[in-house]
Structure formats: C-alpha cells, structure tokens
Amino acid sequence: MPGDELARCVGMLLPLLEHIVYGPVRSRRLGRPLGVNLLPAGMKVCNMNCAYCQYGWTRGAPRITARHRSWPDVERVAAAVEQRLGEAAQKNELLDRITVAGHGEPTLHPAFEDVAEGLRAVRDRMAPGVRLAILSNSTTAAWPDVTRGLAFFDERYMKLDAGDPITFARINGAGRSSDASLAKIADALSALSSVVVQAMFVSDASHDFDNATDGAVQKWLSAIERVKPSRVHIYTIDRAPADAALRPVPTRRLREIAERVRAAGISADVFPSRRHQR
C-alpha cells in the first residue's frame, strides 16, 4: 500500500500535546487509559527517532531540551493529575489506567524519579483501584534514577523492536547503535521487576524497514529470551507513521511471531491494526 494511501486510511500524524493530562484515549492494548505527558508542551523530546512514531520525526537534541525550562515540574504534574482524577470521580468516569506516555520519552524528564513518586502518591489517594503504567523506549532503563522511578509503577511497558544493531538503527533511528547498546538495554530490562515488552512490527515495499522477516525475528527472539519479560505485546501500526512508506504487518504474521515467543515459554498477545487485519 503506498504511503499516502496508508496515511489517508489511518489518519494524519497526531499533533503534539499542549497539556499534562489528556484523554482518556482508546487503546488497543490498555483499554481506556488517562494519559500523562511529562514532556514540554508542544515539544517532542526523545533520544530515538522511530520511523513509525505517530507524532512524527524527532527534531533537535534531547541533551539540550532536557534542560529546557518548560518541562512541567513535580508539583504541576501532581496537581494536574489530581484535578483530573477528581473530575473523573465526580462523573463516575471509567478509567482503566493512568498511563505516562506523551509525545516523547517520559523518562528523560530531569526529575523523573520525583515525578513518578508524586504520581504514585496522587493515585493512591485519589484512585487506588486504577493501575499506574508507563510506556518507555527502554534506553534509559539502566540509569539509577530511572530504575528507581520505574519501581513506582504497577505496569512497565518497555519497548524492544529489534535484536540486531542494523534493524535497531533503521526502525528506531538509534544512530550509532551496536550490539553493546542493545545488550545493555536487554540487561537493564532483565533487571527490572515484571516488565511487559512492547514490540512494534512494520514493513515497507523495499524492505528497508522490516523487522518481521525470519532473520530479524530470530535475533529479536534472542533478545526477548535474554530479557525474560512477564509478557510480550506484539503489534503493528494503526495510525499514520513518521515515514509514510511504512505498512502494517499482516495479522497472520504477527500471530506467527507470537507463537515463536510462546514456544520460548513467554506469554504473548497480538494487537493487529484495526484497519488492516488480513
């Protein structure tokens, strides 16, 4: 399917968020989560540049923007979430999770550990029955403050799309990636308590971006076995990606990949594109 046709099918790139709290949104994997954006308003900050990102390409250097004064501080984040949870309680609004995600990598927040602790306290006080979750690209999982911050979450959804440096560089825009960097990510994930690996599979007509081939999947499986996650979420694009040439991976292929994960003794769930389920 040509890139422009896919874009029309799944919609345009999502606009960058202007507020700390958003949603609840519809999620294939997480139900109706209330989103929390720790990134500066209208500014994507990420240390990866994934070809499938629904917010478009990453611009600028995260080391510069990580010190930007517009990062929301601990008190602002806690107050925004507390207010929104109060509104939800008054309306008897159904929330499946409070999910830290946003339009970049949330663990790059310069006070991530303190923010995570504050969110846990607000959740415990305002909505103790709602799970606190985070979506991360996994690259910072070995940082001591990030490791401590991740411990405040009930659910840690950590990205791992590739098991070799070439695929990692192409799919995730990881720059000078290497076996060592992927090994460090796998080691960091394996040290965390009860992580769910989230793996996005994509392809294109030229196979320049394709992590669903037998060779790429075998190397990815080796990394998965090293991490030993509690579950693996296997999915494909459902919205317009940064690279318009990308296509969803067929459901049958996602299921084949899931079976290989299960054969390794690890639970796996498949979340196909809602518009392309062949």
Image (cartoon, rainbow, N blue to C red):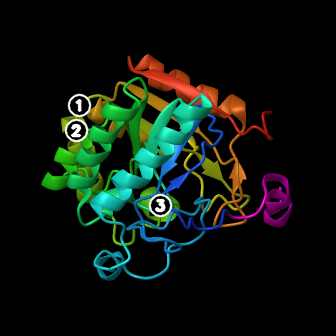
Left or right, 191 with respect to 118, comes to left
Q: Check disc 2: other Cα within 10 Å, few if <14, some if 14-19, many if 20+.
A: some
Would you say residue 178 is visible in this rendering?
Answer: no
The quarter in which the C terminus is drawn is top right
Between the C-alphas of marks 2 and 3, the distance is: 25 Å
Going from N to C along the chain, the mark reached first, 2 or 3, is: 2
Asked whether 7 falls inside the magenta stretch, the response is yes
Counting from the top left corner in percent of width and height, residue 267 is at 44, 20
- Looking at the rendered structure, the kind of residue marked 2 is Ala
Q: Residue 172 shows which numbered tag?
A: 3
How many residues crowd around disc 3 within 10 Å: few (fewer than 14), some, or many (20 or more)? many
- Numbered badge on residue 193: 1
Q: Earlier in the sequence, mark 2 or mark 1?
A: 2
In front of the other: 252 or 75: 75
The reply to whether residue 2 is visible in this rendering is: yes
Q: Secondary structure at mark 1?
A: loop
Q: Is residue 77 above or below residue 87?
A: below
- The residue shown at (62%, 38%) is 27
- Check disc 1 and give the amino acid type: Ser
Q: Are marks 2 and 1 in contact (CB under 8 Å)?
A: yes
Query: In the picture shown, does residue 44 fall above or below 165?
Result: below
The secondary element bearing badge 3 is classed as helix
The residue indicated by pointer 2 is 151
Asked if 166 appears above or below 65 in the picture, the reply is above
- Farthest left residue? 144
